Amino acid sequence: MMTFNTKAEILFQLDDFKAKKEIAKILFDKKNFMRYKWKGGNTNLGKALRLLMDKGLSTSHGSRTDVPQIAVIITDGEPNDRFHLEFAKALTEIRKTDIIVYAIGVGPSRRPENLIKITGDPNRVFELKDYDSLRAIINKLVVKLCDDEQNDDEKENPCNPEKPCDGAMADVIFVADSSRSLGDISFNKLKQFAKAVVKRFTVSPIDIQVGFINFGNDPNFEFKLNSYRDQDEVMKAISKVQYLDTAERMQLTYTGKALNLLIQKGFLHENGGRGGRVPKIAIIITDGAPTDIDVTHRLAKKAKQQGMIIFAIGVGDWMKQDEIDLLASDPKTTHAFLVENYDALSFIEAALAKKTCIAAHQMISMAPEFFN
C-alpha cells in the first residue's frame, strides 16, 4: 500500500503480511490511524508512479516474477503544473512495463483523459462523484482484478473457476484496418494482438472458427472461417497477412466496404459459417474515421440487426468514442474499446478474448426463435 501527495510513501510492502486478516488488522487498528491519516499537499502522481515501479512492485519488496503485477491508483485531481513533466516521464516508463494499472478518479476535479493515459485502457478506469461511491464499485473492481490475475491459461481463476473459452462455439472474423495512417510497425502490432487473442481460443470446426478481413480502399478476405482447422494454422495465417498500403497506392479507411464484405460473404455456409445458433462475431480494429462514414454507419446497424455481435476497437488520437460506439454492439461498455496506441492493444487482449467467449456462450443459450 502506498500514499502520495507532494511526496510518495510506501505504507507497507507486498511481503510485509502473509494473510488478509493481518492487513485488515493494520488498516482498522486505531493505533495506526495517525500514520494513515490525510496529510494534504500537492498531487505528484508522477512521483507515485515512479515509486511504484522502483520499489512498490520490485522483487526485493515481495513482487513475484511468475504472477501479474497489478496497481490500483485512486486520485481526485490532476498533477499540479510543476509536476506535469515528471508525470509525463513516469507515464512513458510505466507503459514499457508489464504492470496492469487500474485508475479510480473521484470528484469534480478528476481528469478522465489522464486516467486513461495511466491505464492504457478505458475499461480499467472508474469515475466516481465522491469517495462515498467507492463502496459501490468494490465487487466490480474485484471481478476485473481477478480477470487480469487470470492471464495464465493453465491457472485457475481464484475469483471465477470457470474458463469462459472452454466449450465456446462461435464464428469469429477479425476486420483489420490496413490504411496509410498505421504504417508497417503498427500493422504488425495489430497482427500480434489478433494472434494473442486467438491463442486464448479453442480453434476447431466444432469450437471457435476464425476468419480475417484486411481493408483499406477495398477489403481482402485474407482467409475464411473454414480455411484453417486449428489454432496453430490460424496464427501462422495471421502472420502472413500483408499490409495493404504501398508507395504505389495509398490506402484510405473504407470501413463501410469491409462491413459490406462481412455482411455479404463473411458468414456464408460455403465460407465456413455454421449458421443457426452459432454466434457470428466480428472484431473490428481501426485507427481512423471511416472514409465512407455514412455507409459505415448504415451497414454497422444492418450487421447488428442481422444478429452479428461486433466488438469495435479504436486506436489513437484520431478515433472518437462516439464513432466506436456506432460500430459496436450493445452494451457499449462491453463491446467498445478505445486505446491510446497499438502498443496499448496488449492491455485489452485478455478482456477481449474473455468477452468474446462469454458472448458466444450467451448466444448459444438464447431461445431458438432468436435465430429465426
Image (cartoon, helix red, strand yellow):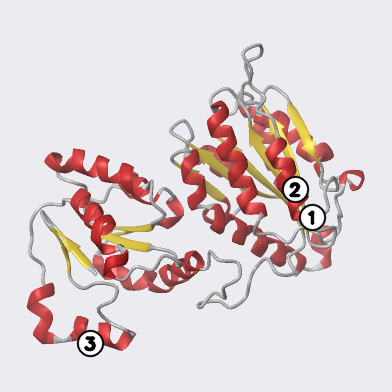
Please name which of the two marks, 1 or 3, marks the residue nearer to the observer.
1
Q: Is residue 307 visible?
A: no
Is 134 drawn above or below residue 172 in the view shown?
Answer: below
Mark 1 → mark 3, Cα distance in angstroms: 51 Å
Q: Nearer the viewer, mark 2 or mark 3?
A: 2
Marks 1 and 2, how far apart in space? 6 Å
Pick the residue in front: 105 or 198. Answer: 198
Q: Quadrant of the N terminus?
A: bottom left
Image quarter where the C terminus lies is bottom right
**Badge 3 local density, few (<14 within 10 Å), some, or many (20+)?**
few
Q: Residue 108: where, in percent of width, then height?
A: 24, 53
Q: Is residue 170 left or right of residue 343?
A: right
Q: Residue 314's x, y, as percent?
A: 53, 40
Which secondary structure, mark 3?
Answer: helix
Query: Which residue is most to the right?
Result: 270
Q: Residue at x 66, y 11 (%)?
A: 248
Residue 235 locus on image (x, y percent): 71, 47
Q: Is residue 259 above or below residue 28?
A: above
Closer to the chain start, of discs 2 and 3, is: 3
Residue under label 3, please give it.
Answer: 25
Q: Which residue is mark 2?
A: 234
Identify residue for label 1: 230
The answer to whether residue 349 is above or below residue 242 is below
Q: Nearer the viewer, residue 195 or 5?
A: 195
Disc 1 on helix, strand or loop?
A: loop
